[in-house]
Image (cartoon, rainbow, N blue to C red):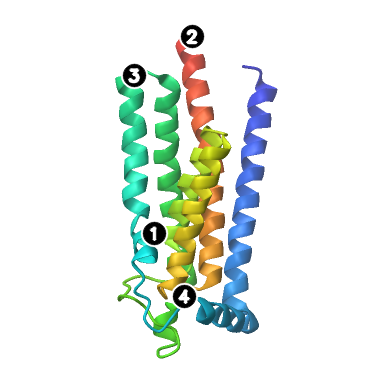
Amino acid sequence: MPPYYNSYMLNTNRQRMKKLSTIIWSLTLFISTQAGAQNIDVDILKSINPPNPNSQVWKSASQSVYPMSAILVVGTLAYGFIDQNKQVQHNGYDLLLCTGISLTITEILKRTVDRTRPAEAYPGVIFSASPSVDRSFPSGHTSQAFAMATTVSLQYRKWYVVVPAYLWAGSVGYSRMYLGKHYPTDVLAGAVVGAGSSYLSRYLTKKIFREKKLTTHE
């Protein structure tokens, strides 16, 4: 492979990482420093979160994230190996990698921003369906849902895949606000982190398997 090609790919990767980092940290700064934004956040959340958030529909949407992710990753990898389909195997690795990236970035941001959950910050105003054990920003459920939805949509570019995938991810984000678990900006940041993790994973997966293929043929 020509040296200039490797240099070009390295620069492209750096540019993508820089853009993703800029978006994430801009959101972090926005949440950390803007009192007015906090008020808007609370006002929007109050209009979504009822005093008794016990809808089974939204509880099910929220609870579906990690089981659905596991089914997608394990099912895709299993089918790929059983059918000996390399492309499907690569799709499975892509799903697994984007999950790892999304979870890692989310955890770093939670620890960095250290934002209190809305029901804890505004007792009697925001109502949570159950206690929470970690921090609020960004929404991990939303991040994971959008990571899965974006990855699947990039792998299978059909409307009957893309539309249901994003409807599901959107329902997860809404459910986290309905249940009083997250502010709207937590959900927005989670969607950005999830989608960004998917694009980064797709780039890395293609690069890994392209280089592996080139090494095999040498």
Disc 1 target residue: 61
Tell me if mark 4 has few (under 14), some (14-19) or many (20+) residues whose alpha carbon lies within 10 angstroms of its own. Answer: some
Q: Earlier in the sequence, mark 3 or mark 1?
A: 1
Disc 2 target residue: 217
Q: Quadrant of residue 11?
A: top right
Disc 3 target residue: 83
Q: Are marks 3 and 1 in contact (CB under 8 Å)?
A: no
Q: Earlier in the sequence, mark 2 or mark 1?
A: 1
Q: CA distance from mark 4 to mark 3?
A: 46 Å
Give the amino acid at mark 4: Arg
Q: Earlier in the sequence, mark 3 or mark 2?
A: 3
Give the amino acid at mark 3: Asp
Residue at 61%, 39% in the rendered image: 13
Q: Secondary structure at mark 4?
A: loop
Q: Is residue 32 left or right of residue 64?
A: right
Q: Secondary structure at mark 3?
A: loop
- Front residue of 17 and 99: 99
Seen in the picture, residue 36 relative to 73 is either above or below; the reply is below
Q: CA distance from mark 4 to mark 2?
A: 51 Å
Q: Is residue 153 left or right of residue 9?
A: left
Q: CA distance from mark 3 to mark 1?
A: 31 Å
Residue 199 position within the rendered picture, expressed as x and y whole percent measured from the top left: 56, 42
Q: Secondary structure at mark 1?
A: helix
